[in-house]
């Protein structure tokens, strides 16, 4: 694995300090209020963190995928909803930036890269989650444009995003009949349902987006060509899965940090509980699991930087990292004992957040399907 340059190391250290001093202290308040932390997202934008992996010509910093994901890890370590928000924003921005026509790229990407507009990604529907190609939202030709009708589900940033990457059907030709559209929040005929009531990530709204015969200009068709939406969606998700892997490692690290701190200070039988092998071995497994997941997502990121096919390794990183986060947060609650079951400490929230990461950007069962098929394909 390549060593980070001095500027990259300085960037990560800056993010770590900002996350500890300004982001982490605000996390509980935003979670309690069920409010998206737009002020914190604006903080990230002001530090040029919303455009890290994008080219300078659209206002980005042009850093490597590995460095960008290390930033996501540090932000999530402080506040999971914000770290996941940065990942989702980047996923949507990448999809638009990569598949746009030159004119669309100039029009739609710079505001996303700058963070003045918050991005969202809209593929799933109530009847087509894992089976994404079964989506039914339809874009029908109407003169020079389209009429968009249907309901998208499980949209992260639904109702707070400024720009959505939306997949809709333009023909009945299965996956080849899906196209991608760039839709702004002020789109006529588009409404947002009340946010879903989730077990965690309360500061990250998830909502259905409803299109009722919404008139969409032809220049909103991403790439200017029908039938490219499914490929756009799947390629975007590969990067998104690495983003969620980085989020999971950040969350696992936060849980480990809390567990180690508590095990050092909590005494039973006249000594810190960290001195007992049952607890010490638990901490050791948490640390090893987290470090292994970290190495895998960073290796996958380097492969992406090299232009290699990352479909299988991205799925592996997502599975390994989110499963590691689930086990590590569970173990952190165990270290805390009864206190870990209360909202007086953050580990119970980490546990709930880890479960969400096993599901978003493709369930871990779907990731295992991707991996197994890649291994057995002739």
Image (tube, rainbow, N blue to C red):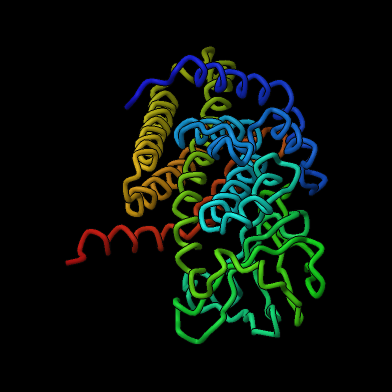
Q: Measuring 55% from the left and 40% from the top, which residue is drawn there? A: 54
Q: Viewed as shown, does residue 2 lie left or right of 244? A: left
How far across and down, in percent of the image, does residue 133 sit? 48, 75
Picture quarter containing residue 339? top right
159 and 236: which one is in front? 236
Give left or right: position of 44 versus 271: right
- Residue 48, percent across and down? 66, 31
x then y, percent, for residue 212: 76, 80
Residue at 47% from the left image edge and 73% from the top image edge = 131
**Quadrant position of residue 56:** top right
Image position of 32 with respect to 285: above or below: below
Q: Position of residue 16 (x, y in %)?
A: 60, 22
The correct choice, above or below, for 112 with respect to 230 in the image is above
Let me know if residue 348 appears in the view: no
Image quarter where the C terminus lies is: bottom left
- Is 32 situated left or right of 258 in this image? right
- Tell me what residue is drawn at x 50 percent, y 21 percent: 8
- To which quarter of the image does residue 174 belong? bottom left
- Residue placed most toward the observer, 363 or 289: 363
Residue furthest out toward the left: 378
In this rendering, the answer to whether 144 lies above or below 311 is below
- Which one is in front, 162 or 82? 162
What's the residue at 48%, 69% (across, down)?
228
Q: Look at the image and tell me whether residue 35 can be seen.
A: yes
């Amino acid at each position: 694995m390549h060593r980070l340059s001095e500027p990259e190391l300085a960037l990560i250290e800056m993010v770590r300090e900002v996350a500890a001093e300004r982001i982490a202290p605000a996390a509980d308040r935003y979670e309690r209020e069920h409010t998206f932390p737009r002020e914190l997202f604006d903080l990230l934008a002001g530090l040029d963190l919303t455009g890290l992996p994008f080219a300078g010509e659209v206002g980005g910093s042009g850093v490597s995928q590995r460095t960008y994901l290390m930033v996501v890890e540090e932000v999530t370590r402080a506040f999971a909803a914000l770290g996941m928000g940065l990942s989702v924003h980047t996923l949507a921005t990448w999809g638009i930036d990569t598949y746009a026509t030159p004119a669309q790229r100039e029009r739609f990407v710079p505001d996303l890269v700058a963070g003045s507009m918050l991005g969202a990604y809209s593929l799933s529907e109530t009847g087509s989650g894992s089976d994404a190609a079964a989506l039914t939202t339809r874009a029908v030709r109407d003169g020079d444009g389209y009429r968009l009708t249907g309901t998208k589900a499980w949209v992260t940033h639904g109702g707070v995003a400024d720009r959505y990457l939306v997949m809709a059907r333009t023909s009945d030709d299965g996956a080849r009949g899906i196209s991608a559209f760039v839709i702004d929040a002020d789109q006529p005929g588009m409404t947002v349902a009340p946010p879903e009531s989730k077990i965690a990530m309360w500061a990250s709204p998830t909502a259905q987006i409803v299109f009722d015969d919404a008139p969409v200009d032809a220049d909103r068709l991403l790439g200017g060509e029908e039938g490219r939406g499914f490929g756009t969606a799947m390629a975007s998700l590969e990067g998104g899965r690495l983003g969620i892997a980085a989020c999971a490692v950040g969350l696992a690290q936060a849980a480990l940090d809390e567990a180690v701190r508590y095990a050092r200070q909590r005494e039973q039988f006249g000594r810190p509980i960290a001195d007992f092998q049952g607890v010490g071995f638990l901490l050791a497994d948490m640390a090893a699991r987290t470090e292994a997941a970290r190495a895998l997502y960073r290796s996958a990121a380097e492969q992406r930087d090299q232009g290699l096919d990352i479909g299988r390794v991205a799925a592996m990183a997502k599975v390994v990292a989110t499963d590691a986060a689930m086990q590590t947060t569970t173990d952190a609650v165990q270290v805390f004992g009864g206190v870990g079951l209360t909202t007086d400490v953050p580990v119970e929230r980490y546990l709930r957040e880890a479960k969400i990461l096993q599901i978003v950007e493709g369930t871990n069962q779907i990731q295992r399907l991707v991996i197994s098929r890649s291994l057995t394909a002739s």
